[in-house]
Amino acid sequence: MVVVIGGAEAEASGLSAETVSAGDPTFAGPLAGVELGLSVFHVVEEEMKAEFDDAVYDEQCGMMEMVLDVDEIVSEVKSVRDQFCKYL
């Protein structure tokens, strides 16, 4: 199972990624302390983009990708994935 997220900011994306991998770091939700270890990717990561039809990706994500700090988002999500993912 792979979780695909699409947050517009690196910090929010990292928080979402950590929640489904290491458990809710805010201890406010139902996944508080629950380490699922799931693989998390952001929709703008090359591994995910390769899975989509180019025309569909461009239509649904292309405009958003132009205004996001893609490198920062990818770095944040990859860091969480590398640290907490149990299933690669």
Image: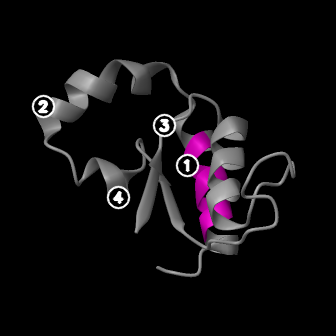
Q: Earlier in the sequence, mark 1 or mark 3?
A: 3
Nearest to the observer: residue 6 or residue 24: 24
User: Distance from label 2 to label 1 (Cα)?
Assistant: 22 Å
As helix, strand or loop, the secondary structure at mark 3 comes to loop
The residue sitting at 73% across, 53% down in the picture is 30
As helix, strand or loop, the secondary structure at mark 2 comes to helix
Q: Is residue 44 above or below residue 51?
A: above
Amino acid residing under circle 3 = Gly
Reading the image, the residue beneath label 3 is 6
Q: Earlier in the sequence, mark 2 or mark 1?
A: 2
Residue located farthest toward the right when viewing the structure as drawn: 27
User: Distance from label 3 to label 2 (Cα)?
Assistant: 18 Å
Nearest to the observer: residue 39 or residue 65: 39
As helix, strand or loop, the secondary structure at mark 4 comes to helix
Q: Earlier in the sequence, mark 4 or mark 3?
A: 3
Asked if the residues shown at circle 2 and circle 4 are in contact, with their CB atoms under 8 angstroms apart, the answer is no
Picture coordinates of residue 11 (x, y %)? 73, 38
The residue sitting at 59% across, 60% down in the picture is 78
Reading the image, the residue beneath label 4 is 47
Reading the image, the residue beneath label 1 is 74
Amino acid residing under circle 2 = Ala
User: Distance from label 2 to label 4 (Cα)?
Assistant: 16 Å
Q: Earlier in the sequence, mark 4 or mark 1?
A: 4
In the image, the segment drawn in magenta is 73-81
Reading the image, the residue beneath label 2 is 55
Amino acid residing under circle 4 = Glu
Asked if the residues shown at circle 2 and circle 1 are in contact, with their CB atoms under 8 angstroms apart, the answer is no
Q: Main secondary structure of the magenta part?
A: helix
